[in-house]
Amino acid sequence: MAVRRFFEIEQRNDITILLLISENDFEELLVNDLQRAIVAFVEQERPHKLLVDFVNVRRFSSETINGLIRARRRLNEYQAKMCLCSMRPEIHDVFRMMRLDGTVFDIVPTRNEALQYLVGP
């Protein structure tokens, strides 16, 4: 498992897992760094299937969603799949309020469900 400043990287067959590390709960000062780190990872590694795991995240700035949207757009360029999982209800609510759940992002409750989703039929 590789570790970067904001996330750990794990590979399961053709699925790349980014386990977010909740450094200072992604306070304002870190938001831009996190956005750049996620987008840079996607641009450099070009994962075919990407799972972003929020299990360690207690608080999350809605501004960081922009980085995930940018990563999603990059993944769309080469038809890659992306799934988010293990969000606390209050974080998931932000995605729902912004109408991103089920439209821009596929969000599922657990890592196992996300892995099953990404394996697909």
Image (spheres, grey):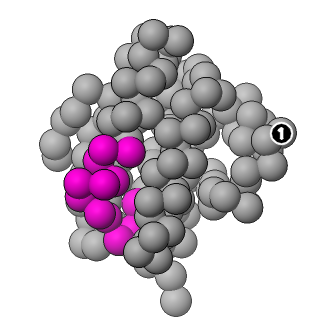
Q: Residue furthest left?
A: 2
Task: Please state the horizontal and vertical placement of residue 99, each as a whole percent of the image.
Answer: 80, 49
Q: Residue furthest bottom?
A: 121
- Against 73, residue 49 (above or below) is below
The reply to whether residue 21 is visible in this rendering is: no
Q: In the image, what residue occupies the spot 29% across and 63% down?
A: 46
Pick the residue in front: 29 or 58: 29
In screen coordinates, is 9 left or right of 27?
Answer: left
Task: Please state the horizontal and vertical placement of residue 77, each as a whole percent of the image.
Answer: 45, 70
Q: Which residues are magenta?
A: 39-50
Task: Please state the horizontal and vertical placement of residue 1, each as a whole percent of the image.
Answer: 17, 46
Pick the residue in front: 63 or 108: 63
Q: In the image, what residue occupies the spot 63% across and 57% down?
A: 105
The type of residue carrying mark 1 is Met
Magenta stretch encompasses residue 70: no
Pick the residue in front: 41 or 57: 41
Q: In the image, what residue occupies the spot 39% across and 68% down?
A: 49
Instruction: Find residue 117 and report its image quarter.
Output: bottom right
Q: How many marks?
A: 1
Instruction: Find residue 107 and report its image quarter.
Output: bottom right
Residue position marked by numbered label 1 in the rendering:
97
Mark 1 Cα shell of 10 Å, populated few (<14), some (14-19), many (≥20): few
Magenta stretch encompasses residue 42: yes
- Helix, strand or loop at label 1? It is helix
- Against 19, residue 33 (above or below) is above
Task: Please state the horizontal and vertical placement of residue 10, each as a whole percent of the image.
Answer: 25, 52
Q: In the image, what residue occupies the spot 50% across and 82% down?
A: 120
The reply to whether residue 26 is visible in this rendering is: yes
In screen coordinates, is 106 left or right of 114?
Answer: right
